[in-house]
Image (spheres, grey):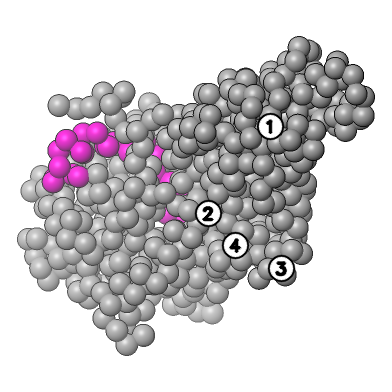
């Protein structure tokens, strides 16, 4: 029996990543975005399932392994154990599952899926000849290629390397038969492909007509054998796309599958958009399965004006940056600085400027100032507000607006930059409130009225920080946990993990009497970090 919308889990996937090399910033960008999105929905109180993993078949993996003198399986095992899993742990990625396409739970189900298409008459045998990019693991249309030194050396537009001209007998999926149904789906569900630029690109592509898709390879054997012809292995992209189904229990656990499928969001890079927005939904239609709710394409991270890429030798390791700025600042920066869905350039200078201005000065310094003043004026015990007035009401109102805007932008629109902008607008509201109210000046007046006013000011700032700990927990979990501890919130409100986005806006939740401690600096000066490392 299908699950209702209320019962269904919010199921988010990243692309599964090729293990021909170690992960770079581009991989981490998508995976951190998915982590923040799913953490946000968990803090809404929803059931969430976050999937990532590795794509381990295909000619590119085979050649890489051969170049290193090991078997493809040995190469995949090594890279997953030494690079991919450790990096996600380092970046605090809270994925619920990690799928590898060499796992039996995947290979068996992928073979069953394609057998089902074959049995339905959706697959036939034929021949194909054309330009092929091993880096993309994709046949290219001649019109897509860039000029090369000769006609035979034309370049892949993604990898800027010569394509190979292949001719082989393959099995084909009747992709061309699904152009009209795809266009009808895009029209009925305009939210299916995002952002608008990605949707428009797919529409133009499908409107020109589709060619049937070669779904097997017979020139190498590193892949899932076709169940009806073991001289062929499944085309790596058809194999890889199945991961979203197999991890959800398709063909193995009907109850789990009913709860998870269709996926709520497929996060993909724009260079693999067509696979996810054209080929994948066409195969699902052919199999009689529901389509995912949304395919959201992020842009490219650029270095020196070119896409960040391992094959172009422009891949930067995330650990190069986390060693300097810290993990939480890393998670914050890329989602704040680069609007999701657009191309963006990384620079050390911009990262440094945002770290210093937004994290260290605006946010971190606010927490330090509050803790210092509560310690100095009230021996570390948060005082109760006394007759809060219009200034305090304005702060509470600003919080309500910030929570609503951040929830809409991050939770619904995947506009991480806009959502974090709303949160940091509230950081500036609290800083402005402290500057205007000048508690250090009020503290000089020994009267009871002034003492009450001082208590109100400090309580208001502390309550603002309590809300910020909740709002920033999905983005900067370690920092939020330190702030929660500094505010003495856990003994009185419970663990930070139990707080919801909705309650972030409930003004007055942090009780008077909370023990405020200074703790470590949330975002130390970069000079101090350099000395530490």
Which quadrant, please, contains the N terminus?
top left
Q: Can you say whether 40 is above or below 391 in the image?
A: below
Query: In terms of sequence position, does the residue under pointer 2 or pointer 4 come before the other?
Result: 2
- Where is residue 484? Give x, y as percent: 58, 39
Q: Which residue is mark 2?
A: 29
Judging depth in this view, the residue of 469 and 93 nearest the camera is 469
| Mark 4 closeness class: few <14, some 14–19, many ≥20 residues within 10 Å | some
Tell me the element at label 1.
loop
- Where is residue 508? Give x, y as percent: 62, 20
Q: Nearer the viewer, mark 3 or mark 4?
A: 3
Rendered residue at 45%/29% (across/down): 44
* 390 with respect to 318 (left or right): right
Q: Disc 1 to disc 2, how far (Cα)?
A: 40 Å
Q: Which residue is mark 3?
A: 530
Q: Can you say whether 306 is above or below 41 in the image?
A: below
Q: Disc 3 to disc 4, how far (Cα)?
A: 12 Å
Query: In terms of sequence position, does the residue under pointer 3 or pointer 1 come before the other?
Result: 1
| Mark 3 closeness class: few <14, some 14–19, many ≥20 residues within 10 Å | few
Question: Can residue 141 be seen here?
Answer: yes
- Where is residue 460? Give x, y as percent: 72, 25
- Where is residue 150? Give x, y as percent: 50, 79
Q: Is residue 272 magenta?
A: yes
Marks 1 and 2 close (CB-CB < 8 Å) = no
Tell me the element at label 2.
helix
Q: Which residue is mark 1?
A: 381
Disc marking residue 322 = 4
Q: Disc 2 to disc 4, how far (Cα)?
A: 13 Å
């Amino acid at each position: 029996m299908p699950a209702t919308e209320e019962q269904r889990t919010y199921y988010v996937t990243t692309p599964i990543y090729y293990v021909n090399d170690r992960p770079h910033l581009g991989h981490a960008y998508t995976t951190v975005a998915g982590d923040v999105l799913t953490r946000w929905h968990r803090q809404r109180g929803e059931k969430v399932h976050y999937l990532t993993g590795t794509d381990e078949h295909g000619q590119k993996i085979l050649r890489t392994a051969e170049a290193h003198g090991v078997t493809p399986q040995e190469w995949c095992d090594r890279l997953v154990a030494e690079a991919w899993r450790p990096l996600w742990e380092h970046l605090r990625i809270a994925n619920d599952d990690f799928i590898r396409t060499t796992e039996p739970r995947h290979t068996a189900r992928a073979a069953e899926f394609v057998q089902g298409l074959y049995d339905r008459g959706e697959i036939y045998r034929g021949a194909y000849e054309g330009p092929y990019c091993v880096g993309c693991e994709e046949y290219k249309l001649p019109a897509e290629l860039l000029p090369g030194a000769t006609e035979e050396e034309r370049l892949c537009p993604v990898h800027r390397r010569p394509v190979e001209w292949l001719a082989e007998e393959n099995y084909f999926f009747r992709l061309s038969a699904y152009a009209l149904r795809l266009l009808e789906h895009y029209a009925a569900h305009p939210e299916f492909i995002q952002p608008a630029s990605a949707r428009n690109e797919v529409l133009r592509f499908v409107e020109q007509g589709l060619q049937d898709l070669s779904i097997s390879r017979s020139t190498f054997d590193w892949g899932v054998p076709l169940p009806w012809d073991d001289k062929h292995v499944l085309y790596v992209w058809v194999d890889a796309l199945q991961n979203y189904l197999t991890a959800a229990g398709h063909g193995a656990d009907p109850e789990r599958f009913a709860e998870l499928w269709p996926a709520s969001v497929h996060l993909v890079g724009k260079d693999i958009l067509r696979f996810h927005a054209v080929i994948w939904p066409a195969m699902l239609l052919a199999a009689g399965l529901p389509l995912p709710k949304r395919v959201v394409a992020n842009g490219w991270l650029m270095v020196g004006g070119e896409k960040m890429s391992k094959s172009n030798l422009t891949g930067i390791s995330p650990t190069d940056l986390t060693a300097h700025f810290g993990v939480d600042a890393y998670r914050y920066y890329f989602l704040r600085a680069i609007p999701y869905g657009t191309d963006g350039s990384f620079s050390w200078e911009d990262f440094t400027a945002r770290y210093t201005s937004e994290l260290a000065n605006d946010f971190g310094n606010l927490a330090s100032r509050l803790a210092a003043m509560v310690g100095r004026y009230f021996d570390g015990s948060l005082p109760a507000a006394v007759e809060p007035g219009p200034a305090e009401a304005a702060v509470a109102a600003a919080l309500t607006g910030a929570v609503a805007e951040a929830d809409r932008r991050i939770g619904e629109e995947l506009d991480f930059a806009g959502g974090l902008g709303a949160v940091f607008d509230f950081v500036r509201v609290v800083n402005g409130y402290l500057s205007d109210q000048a508690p250090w000046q009020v503290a000089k007046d020994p009267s009871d009225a002034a003492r009450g006013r001082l208590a109100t000011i400090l309580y208001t700032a502390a309550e603002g920080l309590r809300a910020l700990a909740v709002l920033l927990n999905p983005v900067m979990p370690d920092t939020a946990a330190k702030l929660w501890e500094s505010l003495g919130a856990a003994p009185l409100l419970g663990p930070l993990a139990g707080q919801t986005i909705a309650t972030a806006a409930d003004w007055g939740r942090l009780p008077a009497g909370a023990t405020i401690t200074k703790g470590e600096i949330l975002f130390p000066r970069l000079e101090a970090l350099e000395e530490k490392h």
